[in-house]
Image: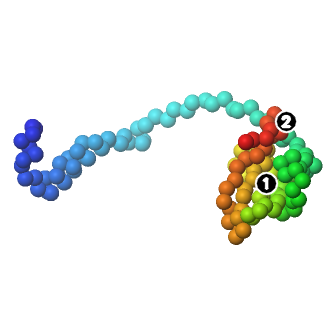
Amino acid sequence: MGLDSFNKNVSRRDVLRGARDLAAASILPIPDTATQLSVEIPVAPIAQSETGPRLESVTEEEVRAIFGILLGSTPFAETRKRNDANGLHLLEVKAPQADGYAEYSYRRGRTEKNELLDWRVDVTFYNETDMPVGGHSVAKKIEGRWSLTP
């Protein structure tokens, strides 16, 4: 099949017939399941702690100290606080700004909710109409130490 084949008038029926032939040639035969052999590969069990993952404790006072470092003398008000069986997992505060407000949010990831197990403080900026206009991470706790993130 050379370049001269492009000059032929090919009907839609010929194109579909060619596509059918290609599809039929690409279908693999499926073996009968009754004749298939089942092979089981032994898998070593994964060792797990009997007490579950060790959670590092973070106190409310520790989180409020981080808010104090981040906000300085700017007044703020607590807007939401949540605890679970492992202690504080959410604390949000609101701080006024010239063109709206900033919401600082401490969150501990919860593995039972498929969240990454980490400790962080994020900020979200809102305008005068309560619409979020930006935000980023401002602090993380890594290996027992809080680090401010730019």
Q: Is residue 73 left or right of residue 6?
A: right
Q: Position of residue 59 (x, y in %)?
A: 91, 47
Q: Position of residue 16 (x, y in %)?
A: 19, 54
Q: Is residue 63 visible?
A: no
Picture quarter containing residue 101?
Answer: bottom right
Of 49 and 126, nearer the camera is 126
Looking at the rendered structure, the kind of residue marked 1 is Ser
Q: In the displayed image of the protein, which residue is found farthest to the bottom?
A: 129
Residue that badge 1 annotates: 105
Give the residue displayed 73% in from the left and 47% down from the top. Answer: 137
Q: Position of residue 48 (x, y in %)?
A: 76, 35
Sort mark 1 into few (<14), some (14-19) or many (20+) by Cα contacts within 10 Å: many
Residue that badge 2 annotates: 144
Q: Position of residue 92 (x, y in %)?
A: 82, 57
Give the residue displayed 79% in from the left and 41% down from the top. Answer: 148
Q: How many marks?
A: 2
Picture quarter containing residue 31?
Answer: top left
Quadrant containing the C terminus is top right
